[in-house]
Amino acid sequence: MSTADIPQATVDALARSVSGRVIGRGDEDHAAAAMPWNMHEQRPALVVEATSAEDVARTVAFAAAEGLRVVAQPTGHSSTGAFEDAVLIRTGALASVELAGDGAVARAGAGALWRDVQAAAVPAGRSGLVGTAPHVSATGYTLGGGIGWLGSPYGVGASRLMAAEVVDAEGRMRRVDAETEPDVLWALRGGGGNYGIVTAVELGLVEAAEVFAGVLAFPLPRVPEILPAWREWVAGVPRELTSMATILRVPDMPTVPEPLRGAQLIVIGACHAGALADGEAAVAPLRALGPIMDTFGPMAPDALGTLHNDPEDPLPDIGGARVLGDVTPETLGRIIDLAGPESDTPLLFVELRHMGGALRAPDAPGGAYDRVDGEFLLHALGVPMGPRAGEIPGAIGALMEAVGPAATGRTPLNFCHTAEEAVGAFDAATLERLREVKRSVDPDGMFLSSHPVGD
């Protein structure tokens, strides 16, 4: 059914049954309510700003009765679809965080951001497997795989999903865990979120009262020296250390903070989750290269979100990513040619993340995306604003083609910038199992997502 055919009285009945707002296409603030964080254009027929799991359940039951499809977004950092003639459920208000299991588990509402989870976990001497951006939903991050600052010692974030509270295709609220619905839990661990509407997750926390972390910054002309040095260095780093190297060109725009405005740098970021002295010793060879900025030191895990300096305000983006089996001198040379000081690339950043330790060899496998099948993750992103916006897709495409021979596939959903890329996150057997789970819990295909691997 087209939502244009829904009687207004039916929409009004939904509005009376939920606590949050119901915004239709004819309402003045529909565009603002439908806008995701990445500013991708979305055109849902209805937006429901849920304030509780009950709101979500009533909305799904309404959609089922009307023959409509449903999509949920806490923030919309990775939106890829228009979702026309669908009901968009905003779950950002479901932001409570509670610790359980003597502080070893965090129960987080779907709208809880990583900063919210860390604010509860760190005073208890714990940490979640936080990503690089503190303003991303911990639920969305986990369902999409989760590659973060504690990845090397502890693995992908999806591996820490202990349970989820899910509204199913009939509008029933269910608890999904290893005992009740192990196949669905397996799918939610990195396989995306279109198997139901997740209203809360239970995440296993790790003991991490303090880490040794920071960034080193070097002028852009030193990329041909620093990037190979970093590549050689990571070959011998301990399992406790996670790092990345970023070629960064910050726009000279008034919205950018003055210290970074117009900066052109190569930045090495790292986090060591073991003894502080061991972390300092591990990073010493890079510090000896003479950075112009060195922020390394002891750090509480709730400050890890400051390392990558991701913008917190909504921002459009065009990006691409590839998992690389290895980065040889030839591959590194291609990256430097296309993104180094002589390239004049329009991209905001080109980044290599080292996929060491448990990211490649998990201690406890058991999810749709439980490991990275490669030693590095290449991620590049441009902001389509200003006179060079039209050059960004070509620059992304050229870079991904240049590293193609080293690509292994299975890029986590968090790094898939289009819906079409999502199926490439999984091997054939995993993809078929995900589709079996989807057919079993959502046979009519009611639930949509930005990464529809289960369809």
Image (cartoon, rainbow, N blue to C red):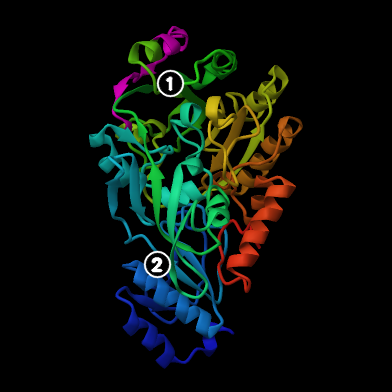
Quarter occupied by residue 365: top right
- 30 and 99: which one is in front? 99
Residue marked by disc 1: 217
User: Which residue occupies 44% across, 52% down?
Assistant: 163
Residue 167 in the image, given as x and y percentages of width and height: 45, 67
Q: Quadrant of residue 27?
A: bottom left
Dot 2: what SS?
A: helix
Q: According to the image, label 2 marks what residue? A: 32
> Is 152 situated above or below 142?
above
What secondary structure is marked by label 1? strand
The spot of residue 335 in percent (x, y) is 65, 27
Asked if the magenta segment contains residue 38, the reply would be no
Indicate the amino acid at tag 2: Ala
Q: Is residue 267 visible?
A: no
Residue 411's place in the image compared with 239, above or below, is below
User: Residue 446, image x and y in percent?
Assistant: 57, 72
Kind of residue indicated by mark 1: Ala
The residue positioned farthest toward the right in the image shown? 405
Which sits in the foreground, 453 or 266?
A: 453
Left or right of residue 374: residue 226: left
Q: Which residues are magenta?
A: 281-301
Q: Residue furthest front?
A: 179
Residue at the image position 62 percent from the left and 63 percent from the top = 438
Say whether disc 1 or disc 2 marks the residue closer to the N-terminus: 2
